[in-house]
Structures are given as structure tokens and as C-alpha cells.
Amino acid sequence: MLVIVNVETGEKVRAVRGGVARWADGAVTHAARAGLRRGAEKVVSCLDAVSGEGAAERVVGEAFDGEAWVVARERYAPVESPEQLRARFTAAIQERLDAFARTRLYDGIQSACTYAASDNPAFAAEGRRCLALRDETWAAAYALLDAVLAGARPAPTLDEMWAELPALTWPEDAAAEPAGLLARARAALSRLFGI
């Protein structure tokens, strides 16, 4: 990017847009390039100097250094509103619970919980486990979120939050590993559809 600066005052006059320099006296230069000068005005390159970490940037200063117009930017982590933080955490927690249930071929945690009253002992055990995990997870998550929103603690990363929430594990007495459930599902499909 190119800008026009007043070399006597060190102030930025305007940006060069589309390669066209519009000078203070009304003159126009097409195909402007760095180093072009008209009176006290000079076309110079605009350099970005970025520091810090984070997903967003803000300008913290601009100045002419005699050669170029330097824009100092700082990266920072934008502050989330309480609503944004709550929405981000709840979406991540819900996806974590749903992904866990899908490891046993349920559509999600809600679907798995409906099996708590199943006549099939294996499905019933898995359904009860999912009910318990869902309740424990949300109770712990809401307590954690309330502490963050009250300023009692900083917002954790998702990995830090997972470490504080209940471990998502299947019950030992539930009928076998996912491969066993998959074999039962295939057998049921075969009976129903002859595949």
C-alpha cells in the first residue's frame, strides 16, 4: 500500500488508491510509485509492524519514519461478551457429549439417553450412563461458567475445561465395545433388509 505524507510535518495526507495519487494542490498522478514527490508531499510505502498474539488486530500508532509510513498494530484476543462466551462453551460441550454418544452409534446424547428405559440390558446401561454423564457434565459446566462470569476465575481453554468436566466413559457392564454393538446393528439390518 502507498500513502502520501508531508515530509516537512511527518503527517499522512491520504492513501494512494488504485495507483492514483491525488496531491494537495489538486494535481493527479496515475501509476504512482514510492519515492514520487510533489512539493512537501511524497509517496511512500506503508509498512505494517505487528506485535503480540491473538486473533484480532488494532492499530496502536502510525508515524512517518523518513522513509516509509509505519503502522504499528497489536494482536490481541478479543473480549467475549457473556452471551458469546456462554454460546461458545455450550456449543462445544454439547458437541463433546454428542460425539461421545456417536462412538456407540447413537445419533447424539439425547438419542442415547432415551435408551435408559430400554428392555435391552446393554442399551439400558448405556442410556443410564449417558443420562448421568449429561447431568454431571452440565452441572459442572454451569458451575464453571458461573465462576468465570462472576470474575472468580479466568475463562479456561476448551482443553482445560475438558479436564475439569466428568470423563466420558462407557459403563463396564454395558454390552461390549463399539465393535460388538456394530455387529448387533449389522445383524439387525440384515434381518430387516436382507443385506
Image: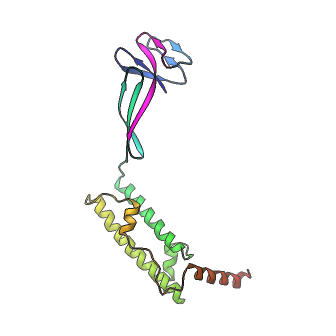
Q: Which residues are magenta?
A: 34-51
Residue placed at 62% from the left, 84% from the top? 184
Quarter of the picture holding the C terminus: bottom right
Does 173 sit above or below residue 36?
below
- Magenta span includes 42: yes
Q: How many marks?
A: 0
Please tell me which residue lies in front, 185 or 86. Answer: 185
What secondary structure is the stretch in magenta mostly built from? strand
Q: Residue furthest left?
A: 152
Instruction: Give the quadrant of residue 152.
Output: bottom left
Residue placed at 54% from the left, 89% from the top? 120
Q: How is the image coloured?
A: rainbow
Judged left or right of residue 9, residue 119 is right
Residue placed at 35% from the left, 14% from the top? 8
Does 190 sit above or below residue 81?
below
Instruction: Give the quadrant of residue 67.
Output: top left
Q: Residue furthest right?
A: 194
Q: Percent x, y for residue 13?
A: 41, 20
Judged left or right of residue 114, residue 63 is left
Q: Percent x, y for residue 131?
A: 44, 79
Does 188 sit above or below residue 24?
below
- Magenta span includes 23: no
Q: Percent x, y for residue 174?
A: 50, 85
Q: Percent x, y for residue 172?
A: 47, 85
